[in-house]
Image: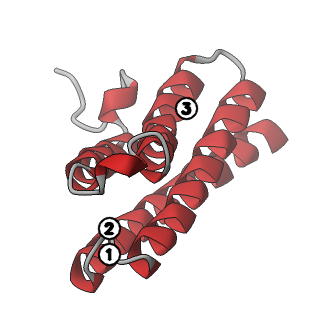
Amino acid sequence: MQNKNTIRSFTDLITWQKALVYVVNIYKTTKAFPHDEVFGLTSQLRRATVSITSNIAEGFGRESYKEKLHFYTISRGSLIESQNQLLIARDIKYIQINHFKDLSEQSIVISKLLNGLIKKTKEVIAS
């Protein structure tokens, strides 16, 4: 019998699962951005959020914990980049404040989860 807590794939990581929801929500949100932002903020925000999940997945697939740490850290950087871009979208009135708060809260949860993943990976490296 398989333990329910066994992580066999990056898709089993709660961090990745929450980040995927965030990516989907960002895609839905940016659909409403002005058409002239397709190659600007829309593209930047989408790429940054996709990078979050992609780097978690790539890190998970790496053999060494130093490599894992590298990709998890890149993922965190992409998350912070997306947080910055959300602030810009809010300030130029592309998204309403309530929607901004929802997305911001999602990003904070992901940040905490990523920080935990990074911390645990560093502990394995140090041991």
**Figure quadrant of the N terminus:** top left
**Disc 1 and disc 3 in contact, CB within 8 angstroms:** no
Q: Is residue 65 above or below residue 22?
A: above
Q: Give the structural element (helix, strand or loop) at label 3.
A: helix
The quadrant where residue 86 appears: bottom left
**Figure quadrant of the C terminus:** top right
Q: CA distance from mark 1 to mark 3?
A: 24 Å
In front: label 3 or label 2: 2
The residue type indicated by label 1 comes to: Phe
Disc count in the image?
3
Q: Position of residue 79 (x, y in %)?
A: 53, 54
Density class for disc 1 (Cα within 10 Å; few <14, some 14-19, many ≥20) is: some
Which residue is identified by label 1? 100
What colouring does the structure picture have? Answer: secondary structure
In this orientation, does residue 87 appear? Answer: yes
The quadrant where residue 29 appears: bottom left
Mark 3 vs mark 2: which is more N-terminal? 3
Which residue is identified by label 3? 55
Q: Position of residue 54 (x, y in %)?
A: 48, 29
Which numbered marker is on residue 103? 2
At 66% from the left and 41% from the top, the residue drawn is 74
Q: Position of residue 118 (x, y in %)?
A: 64, 49
The residue type indicated by label 3 comes to: Asn
Q: CA distance from mark 1 to mark 2?
A: 5 Å
Apparent side of residue 66 relative to residue 72 in the rendered image (left or right): right
The residue type indicated by label 2 comes to: Leu
Q: Give the structural element (helix, strand or loop) at label 2.
A: helix
Task: Looking at the picture, tell me which residue is in the foreground, 113 or 22.
Answer: 22
Apparent side of residue 77 relative to residue 16 in the rendered image (left or right): right
Q: Give the structural element (helix, strand or loop) at label 1.
A: helix
In this orientation, does residue 127 appear? Answer: no
